[in-house]
Amino acid sequence: MKGRDRNAPCWCGSGKKYKKCHLNRDDQPKDNPWSAVDVNRKSFAKKKCCARDVGLGPCDGGVIKAHTVSRGPNLAKIAENGHVLHYTATVQDLNKNGGKLSVKKVGIKDASVFYGFCGKHDRELFSCIENEPFAGRPDQCLAVAYRTISRELYGKDAAAHLRETLRGADKGMQPFEQFMFQKMLDDINTGNEAARREAKVTHDVLTSALVNNQPETIGSYVFEFESPLPFMFAGAWSPFTDFYGNELQNGYSEELLQQIFVSSFAGDERAMVCISWRDIGGAPGKVIAEQIKALAADQQASALFQIVTKHVENIFFNPNWYEGLGDKQKEHLNRLVTDGVDIIGSVPSSPVRLEIDFQLPIASRTFQP
Ligand SMILES: [Zn+2]
Ligand SMILES: [Zn+2]
């Protein structure tokens, strides 16, 4: 290698000179992988109120652990001895496809929390879903969608450091592996930045809907079930395809991707699932909600459950129900979770299978708030 090349910017895009970056990287000792995990954990513990300085009044009371699936009204209903189950991926495993996923126990105090709201905003903005039973009112649908998109945006902000943190994690790898590793970091970063921009736009739209009291900014369908559901969830994603795998939107053009919002609510004898979307023409969320609504009443809970398991990590199971599932059911869930964790939104490869029985209640009605 000539002196000039050694001083050129490194091929990996770090901005450093080659000699200070990838030169002889295959001979360098490996970094301790836990240091990256640690940085990751810290960025997810960053405290920041999502409703600060946006026209929703001043913050107060410090940033708290905010729940995205309500604890009292929802998580407590599916818990056994204060615990629920959820899927976790090992953090070191970046390219989660093929990564190890396991079902772990979590206390409901710590389930589905993020440091994204101050005490006052958390109390005021979500009182209509925390302190009143969910009835599918427009203000309730907006509040839950707003909380969900806030959590999404918080997560994308937190993940923005990932590439810088992991740039050196290819020490000791062979040159081709180094190249593949850096390419993967690049893809992850590109995907995250796009998702972050989209989440920010939607977050701004829903914030102004709250500020101006315009719940009609979103559209929703509420599915009501005859008996309680054994899982609870809240999440959002940008669907590339509809329920049957036909393309709805693609990430290729400059067009912003639209999200679908899903959340569930436990009643005492019944349960509800709310699907929402930003109410613009041809909203992907509306297409999917209508496809699920068109299914037989005894297939709707399963369809919702499977599509959410595939796309949302913020889903929790009743331990007895999960343990009681057969091998076929558990294997299918593992497949959905593993396939759903894609970084840049590849075409779904693991379809929903309505013939697999998850012992879920029958839908009694569907309505638009
Ligand atoms: Zn480099
Ligand atoms: Zn605040």
Image: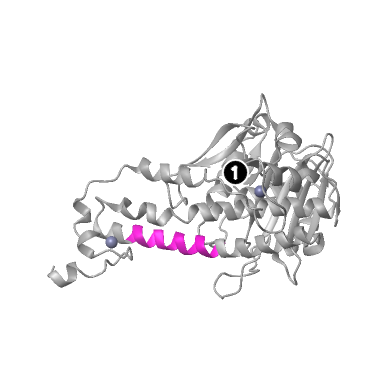
The image shows residue 94 at horizontal and vertical percentages of 43, 50
Report the span colored magenta.
180-195
| Dot 1 amino acid type | Phe
**Residue 7, above or below 210:** below
Q: Which of 265 and 196 lies nearest the eye of the viewer? A: 196
By what rule are the colours in the image chosen?
Answer: one colour
Q: Which residue has dot 1 on it? A: 114
Residue 276 shown left or right of residue 168 in the figure: right
Magenta stretch mostly in which secondary structure? helix
The image shows residue 338 at horizontal and vertical percentages of 53, 49
**Residue 312, above or below 186:** above
In magenta stretch: residue 56: no
Q: Is residue 343 visible?
A: yes
Q: Which of 355 and 134 lies nearest the eye of the viewer? A: 134
**Residue 31, above or below 17:** above
In magenta stretch: residue 184: yes
Determine the secondary structure under disc 1: strand
Q: For residue 252, what is the image quadrant?
A: bottom right
The image shows residue 349 at horizontal and vertical percentages of 56, 58
Q: Residue furthest bottom?
A: 253
Q: Which residue lies furthest to the left in this view?
A: 2
